[in-house]
Image (cartoon, rainbow, N blue to C red):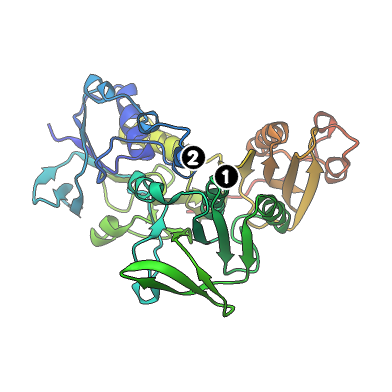
Amino acid sequence: MKPIVIIGAGQAGLALAAKLRALGCETPIKLIGAEPAPPYQRPPLSKKYMLGELDRERLYLRPETFYAENAIELVTGTCVAAIEAAEKIVVLDNGTRIPASQIALCTGADPIRLPKAIGGDLAGVYTMRNLADADAMADEFRPGARVLIVGGGYIGLEAAAVAAAKGLQVTLVEMAPRLLARVACTETAAWFKALHESHGVDIREGVGLSELKGQDGRVTRAHLSDGTDLDVDFVIVGIGVRPGVALAEAAGLAIENGIRTDAMGATSAPGIWAAGDCASFPHKGCRIRLESVPNAIDQAEAVAAAMLEQGAPYVAKPWFWSDQYDVKLQIAGLNTGHDSVIVRPGDKPGTVSHWYFAGARLLAVDAMNDPRAYMTAKRWIEAGQSPELAALADPAIALKSVPLAAPQPELAEAP
């Protein structure tokens, strides 16, 4: 019997394999991962793992016995070289050809690296995406070491928080006029800027990296776009990711900010599916791609059901989180298209939530150490409900007493 071949042994790949078995699938399953480690959690890499608060084994998503017990053939340290879409054949980098009954692409996303022309290939220049990245830079985190972080998104800010907590001298540069320019409002950006500066991080907005210089092949100096130079011991690059579409594109599958799928997770090639960070899918009148653990799990499980003809269209319920110092940021919804933000203080000192609206419609919330605001907003967003703006903006009105506005019409799904 031809196996179901899942390419990518990350959160989505494992969730898909496990769900197939939970739904009663008896077809052989082959889960192929390029990394030598079994499937593991990625979010702690830039947080607790780097701080030494989480052992390597605790990163693993399942115990080793899980795979044999569930008849999942886990193949690690193996790259897929090509997919022959029409015949559904997976070709490994050692030339092995695997005829498949169905194929699922869970190829994730790859970090954007600095060009070699500006010193991106020097030793001491790192990205933070996988376990090998975290292990490679672990010895760099020495008290007093000078680290330059390039990029003011959540990955860069999490790395800055770890470095500052470990006593390093931290400089963070962001080419955009402010932090979190692509993903958060000015209020959230300003809040996190103040947080990091209170921990000694030197944040430089509107400043890019022009060039890295090195000695004996290792980075020693950074030249910035404002003309300043910094002595550095190492550099962490957090300037975004690109969806892992190389295999799909080479196989002739449709690509649109990721591997294009329909609402069931089917790609443009029959019998080939996609889920997780690599997949773009229809959502409320547009097409999106979500980079988050919850989406990787939920979408993969929806695709597993669709592969067995037991599925329904995937309806995303976006939520995200970030841990920095003693702050837990929780995000519900997507803020794309917002035209106003309401800032609401939390019940305790140092807690706050930022509520995004398009007109009277609630789109999303950023909740800093305010789980009550997060859970309330998440419930409202998923139910298609919105609070009355004036009441929400009044801190004298308890959140549980904020009335709901009249229902807003839903947007049509994208094709």
Q: Disc 1 marks which amino acid?
A: Ala
Relative to 392, say whether 172 is above or below.
below
Q: Nearer the viewer, residue 292 or 25?
A: 292
Where disc 1 sits, the SS reads helix
Please state if 140 lies on the left or on the right of 316 as rendered. Answer: left
Please state if 162 lies on the left or on the right of 256 as rendered. Answer: right
Disc 2 crowd rating (10 Å Cα; few below 14, some 14-19, many 20+) is: some
Image mark count: 2
**Tag on residue 51?**
2
Q: Position of residue 400 (x, y in %)?
A: 80, 29
Q: Nearer the viewer, residue 312 or 109?
A: 109
* Residue projecting furthest to the top: 69
Q: CA distance from mark 2 to mark 1?
A: 8 Å
Mark 2 touches mark 1? (CB < 8 Å): yes
Q: Nearer the viewer, residue 410 or 51?
A: 51
Mark found first going from the N terminus, 2 or 1: 2
Q: Disc 2 marks which amino acid?
A: Leu
Q: Please name the residue shown 48% across and 71% down the image.
A: 222
* Residue projecting furthest to the front: 144
Relative to 321, say whether 170 is above or below.
below
The answer to whether any part of residue 313 appears in the image is no
Q: Please name the residue shown 36% across and 50% down the image.
A: 133
Where disc 2 sits, the SS reads helix
Q: Quadrant of the N terminus?
A: top left
**Tag on residue 165?**
1
The answer to whether any part of residue 410 appears in the image is yes
Q: Please name the residue shown 33% across and 34% down the image.
A: 14
Q: Nearer the viewer, residue 64 or 263?
A: 64
Q: Position of residue 399 (x, y in %)?
A: 81, 33
Please state if 65 lies on the left or on the right of 168 as rendered. Answer: left
Q: Position of residue 343 (x, y in %)?
A: 79, 47
Please state if 172 lies on the left or on the right of 390 as rendered. Answer: left
